[in-house]
Image: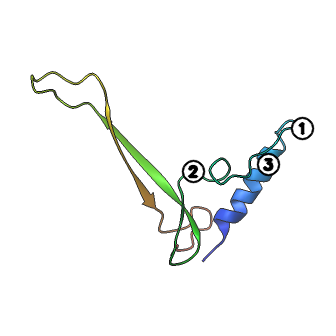
Amino acid sequence: MCNCINEVGAQIEARLKEKVPAGAEVSESTFDTGWDNQVLSLSEGKLFVMLKYKLAYRAKKKNGEMAKNLNRLETNVKMSFCPFCGEPQG
């Protein structure tokens, strides 16, 4: 299994840090820095990035009118292949 997610992430982080003003402090927290929708596979001990799919809909009220607010659903999808090199993921 490849290590592209970590390698590409490190390259992106290095490029973005070039744009950080001098004297600024970069957060090293995994919640603030890194890939969005990152998941740790407990069976493999590897990090995976998942795609998030969102759907918004407006439900009907009991009187037949459409509701004012949107309801939202979302789910994450784990990629079967590395998006960078195409190797099969675990």
Residue occupying the point 76% across, 56% down: 11
- In this view, which residue lies farthest toward the left? 63
Mark 1 neighbour class, 10 Å CA radius: few under 14, some 14 to 19, many 20 or more:
few
Amino acid beneath label 3 = Arg
> Mark 3: which secondary structure?
helix
Badge nearest the viewer, 3 or 2: 2
Instruction: Please count the marks in the image.
Output: 3
Mark 3 or mark 2, earlier in chain: 3
Q: Is residue 81 above or below residue 65?
A: below
Q: CA distance from mark 1 to mark 2?
A: 26 Å
> Mark 2: which secondary structure?
loop
How far across and down, in percent of the image, does residue 87 sit? Answer: 57, 73
Q: Is 35 situated left or right of 41 in this image? A: right
Q: Is residue 80 above or below residue 59?
A: below
Q: CA distance from mark 3 to mark 2?
A: 17 Å
Badge nearest the viewer, 1 or 2: 1
Q: Quadrant of the N terminus?
A: bottom right
How far across and down, in percent of the image, does residue 61 sit? Answer: 15, 26
Amino acid beneath label 1 = Gly
Disc 2: which residue: 36
Mark 3 neighbour class, 10 Å CA radius: few under 14, some 14 to 19, many 20 or more:
few
Mark 1 or mark 2, earlier in chain: 1
> Mark 1: which secondary structure?
loop
Disc 3: which residue: 15
Asked if marks 3 and 1 touch (Cβ < 8 Å), the reply is no
Disc 1: which residue: 23
